[in-house]
Amino acid sequence: MNSKNEMDKIMNEEQLLLKRMQDLAERAYRTGQFTFTGFLSQPEISIFLKASTQFRQYGYTVSGGWREAERSVIRFGSVQELGYETSFPICCLLVQPVMKKFADQLTHRDYLGALMNLGIERSLIGDIIVSETEARIFCMEHIAEFIMGNLDKIKHTSVKCSLTQEEVQNVEEHEIQENETVASERLDAIIAKIFKLSRNESLELFRQKKIFVNSIQCENNSYAPKEQDRISVRGYGKIVYLGKSHQTKKGKINIRYIRFI
């Protein structure tokens, strides 16, 4: 497939996505009830945010169930217009090994693969936060009972699933504040330094459309981040940029940021 055909395919997919969102927004306006998408990927959220001005008249809210969500649901409708409030239909499931001492070291891919093997659509599953011996899986409310009743083994590890008792909004990743010295305050230089990449590897991530700033896909590798910009690099991690602290005697820039681990 040549580049023109690839570009046409991408444009058609974006138009179809926005058309589905337009239909949901109009249904909320017409029926006086909130409507929801399924979980959307970062690229899909980026497409929506770039076109969000056309949805302002309907009102919308974005949430993935916790503060740093990468996969999120869009709710169409506004409290002011509809006259009531409703929560997002998102649940958080805690997945734990039945016997910790016999448990495999499971990865994000292991948990996701087990869910897909149950025949669950990807749009019903949000973020999967993996810690040392357990994971939290965000999912659409109506599929939670099915997961709890059927997800009993991941690789060779027997597991149990339950709804978390804590508030979904309180789930947090560990975060640490760090400093690095960079040659310039360009985004490609910052990403290369923080994630231990060569400059060419950093540039390739931009070409592969894997860089997101405040949930919007960024293809401008020379972009100078602003304080509190949330930068996500698919496959590597995410940070909050805190700005530069000082300039070194050799003319380089010391930057501060929060890294999520």
Image: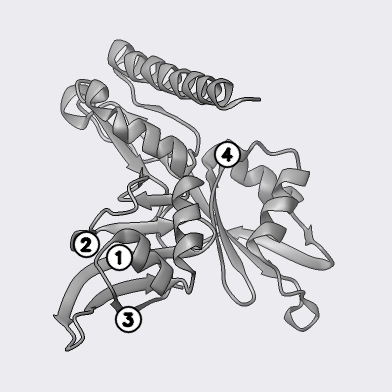
Q: Residues within 10 Å of mark 4 (few under 14, many from 20)?
A: some
Q: Position of residue 228 (x, y in %)?
A: 21, 62
Q: Residues within 10 Å of mark 3 (few under 14, many from 20)?
A: few
Query: Amino acid under label 1?
Result: Val
Q: Residues within 10 Å of mark 1 (few under 14, many from 20)?
A: many
Looking at the image, residue 156 sits to the left or right of residue 195; the answer is right
The CA span between labels 3 and 1 is 10 Å
- Tell me what residue is drawn at x 70 percent, y 48 percent: 115
Q: Nearer the viewer, residue 224 or 95?
A: 224
Numbered disc 2: secondary structure:
loop
Location of mark 4 (residue)? 124
The CA span between labels 1 and 2 is 6 Å
Q: Is residue 115 above or below residue 189?
A: above
Which is in the foreground here, disc 4 or disc 1? 1
Disc number for residue 178: 3
The CA span between labels 3 and 2 is 14 Å
- Tell me what residue is drawn at x 68 percent, y 48 percent: 147
Asked where in the image residue 104 lies, by quadrant, the reply is: bottom right
Which is in the foreground here, disc 2 or disc 4? 2
Location of mark 1 (residue)? 240
Query: Amino acid under label 3?
Result: Glu
Q: Marks 3 and 4: CB-CB under 8 Å?
A: no
Which is in the foreground here, disc 3 or disc 4? 3
The CA span between labels 3 and 4 is 35 Å
